[in-house]
């Protein structure tokens, strides 16, 4: 997916400034600033990172390094319904990969991408702490347990109503 240049409005820049200030513009608070910014904007495009870099006087490369290091952060807008497949040991052993492949096929996207209609994004995560229900899929805040490839179409259709 290619990066899209976005133009931040003045009110958005002021919002980022206030987030930075709420953490005292302290370099040690960068992760908290990034979390709060992603919560506000839904993702962390380069333009948001640049404003944080300037406001906190941290090199842009360092901000980018933190964003790309932690899988929680995203530089791509997430879909309205973020789908995450657990690929931790229990889920993997019980077939998470076949479930993931079915989601890729049904949604016509790869891991880390968002569907063209903006409805779904696809990611993997390590463990949701529901190993007894493996394989586990989350869509937003909802958790699905013992998911089989045959269940994928039905799960997706719940969100298309």
Image: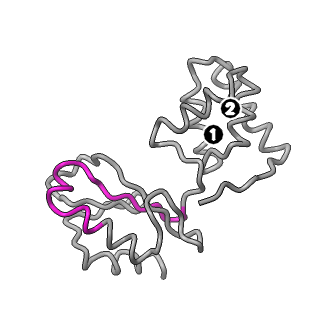
CA separation, marks 2 and 1? 7 Å
Q: Position of residue 58 (x, y in %)?
A: 68, 22
- Please name the residue that numbered disc 2 is placed on: 19
Q: Where residue 105 is drawn, which disc sits there?
A: none
Residue drawn at point x = 73 percent, y = 20 percent: 57
Q: Is residue 72 left or right of residue 98?
A: right
Kindly indicate whether the residue at mark 1 contacts the one at mark 2 (C-beta within 8 angstroms).
yes
Residue at (61% x, 34% y) in the render = 64
Q: Measuring from the top left, give residue 49's x and y in whole percent.
A: 68, 37
Q: Residue 37 carries which label?
A: 1
**Residue located at (45% from left, 74% from top):** 107
Q: Earlier in the sequence, mark 2 or mark 1?
A: 2
Depth order, front residue of 17/91: 91
Q: Is 90 on the left-hand or right-hand side of 72? A: left
Please say whether residue 85 is one of the residues in the magenta stretch.
yes
The one nearer the camera, 60 or 140, is 60
Q: Relative to 26, does residue 12 appear above or below in the rendering?
A: below
In the image, residue 60 above or below residue 27: below
**Quadrant in which residue 22 is drawn:** top right
Mark 2: few, some, or many residues within 10 Å (few <14, many ≥20)?
many
Span shown in magenta = 79-99
């Amino acid at each position: 997916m290619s990066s899209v240049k976005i133009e931040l409005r003045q009110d958005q820049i002021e919002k980022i400034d206030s987030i930075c200030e709420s953490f005292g513009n302290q370099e040690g608070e960068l992760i908290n600033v990034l979390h709060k910014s992603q919560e506000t904007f839904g993702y962390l495009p380069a333009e948001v990172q640049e404003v944080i870099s300037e406001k906190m006087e941290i090199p842009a490369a360092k901000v980018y390094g933190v964003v790309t290091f932690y899988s929680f952060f995203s530089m791509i807008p997430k879909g309205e319904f973020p789908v995450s497949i657990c690929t931790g040991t229990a889920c993997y052993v019980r077939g998470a990969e076949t479930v993931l492949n079915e989601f890729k096929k049904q949604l016509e996207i790869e891991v880390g991408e968002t569907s063209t209609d903006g409805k779904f994004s696809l990611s993997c995560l390590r463990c949701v702490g529901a190993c007894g229900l493996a394989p586990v899929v989350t869509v937003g805040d909802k958790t699905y347990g013992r998911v089989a490839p045959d269940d994928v179409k039905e799960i997706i259709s719940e969100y298309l109503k």
